[in-house]
Amino acid sequence: MELDPILKSTLSLESDVPFYSQLNGIIKHGITSGLLKPGQLLPSESELCGHFGVSRNTVRQAIGALEEDGFVVRKRGKGTFVTDPNLRRKSVPYSFTTEISGMGRTPSSALVDFSVTAPPETVKNVMQLDDSARVYRFTRIRKVDGEPLILETSYYPQYIYPNLTREMLETHSIYSLLYHVGITPVSASDTYEAVLLGKREAELLNCPEGSPGFQHKRRTTNENGNVYEYTTSYMPASSFRLDVHFQKGAASFSRTIK
């Protein structure tokens, strides 16, 4: 049996690039170069650990980043598969994992709470939900190099993924789970507002109550134009810089983590 293309590569022990980032790059190159075909099964976690001599956590970081970028999808009990590039190109190119990894830093997340509930009135209006609708509500602390940076609360209509559980969110990217049922992010609208962090936000972000911060709101829509994700995040102003660049006929926005 022919050796999987991924298992023909090696990691550099002398490089300053973290192992998970090197592994991510190897697999991504295999996908974008066509060596790995849509629908192809990747080597298992244990195979990748054994071949590259790394921990399961390293492999999971690499696969998780690919998953958030839409390059692969994990199917419970079956393995990790290469996704269809035609669908991937339609997705919104945002990923916290990719953003932070691209800075040479280590991203991670901690799930604070998870529930199925009736949406608050504001959320119901933004997402154009019926009075009887139920939503998944979950809060995560996004960390950089182990330090809490963003407190993020997200809402998703229950009907788009009826069997979502807390355990699934702790091991999978929400975008990859939705991709598996045919839901991809096509457009997103972001707003930032200057705020003072309240007691709960400050405690979870390890900063003094009343510290200046940003409140970030994101609405994400699918191919049908339906808002299926609404997220509100809080972040300390001391850790972020927001830049807007203007030129004739265009403007661009960037977020820098200090």
Image: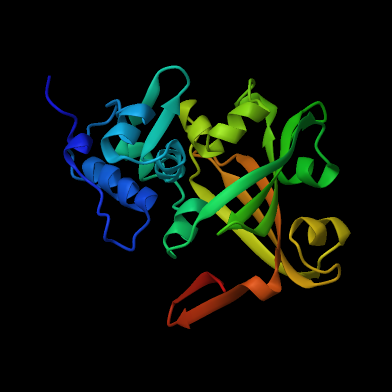
Residue 236 spot, x, y in % from top left? 71, 68
- Judge left or right: residue 137 versus residue 19: right
Q: Visible in this render: residue 95?
A: no
Q: Quadrant of the C terminus?
A: bottom right
Image vertical order of residue 208 relative to residue 24, above or below: below
- Judge left or right: residue 121 versus residue 77: right
Residue at image position (44%, 77%) is 249
Image vertical order of residue 133 relative to residue 250, above or below: above
Q: In which quarter of the image is the N terminus?
A: top left
- Judge left or right: residue 127 versus residue 69: right
Residue 38 spot, x, y in % from top left? 27, 31
Image vertical order of residue 212 relative to residue 62, above or below: below
Residue at image position (69%, 73%) is 237
- Judge left or right: residue 258 versus residue 12: right
Residue 11 spot, x, y in % from top left? 25, 49
Total tally of numbered discs in the picture: 0
164, 207: nearer the viewer: 207
Give the image's coloring scheme. rainbow
99, 123: nearer the viewer: 99
151, 92: nearer the viewer: 151
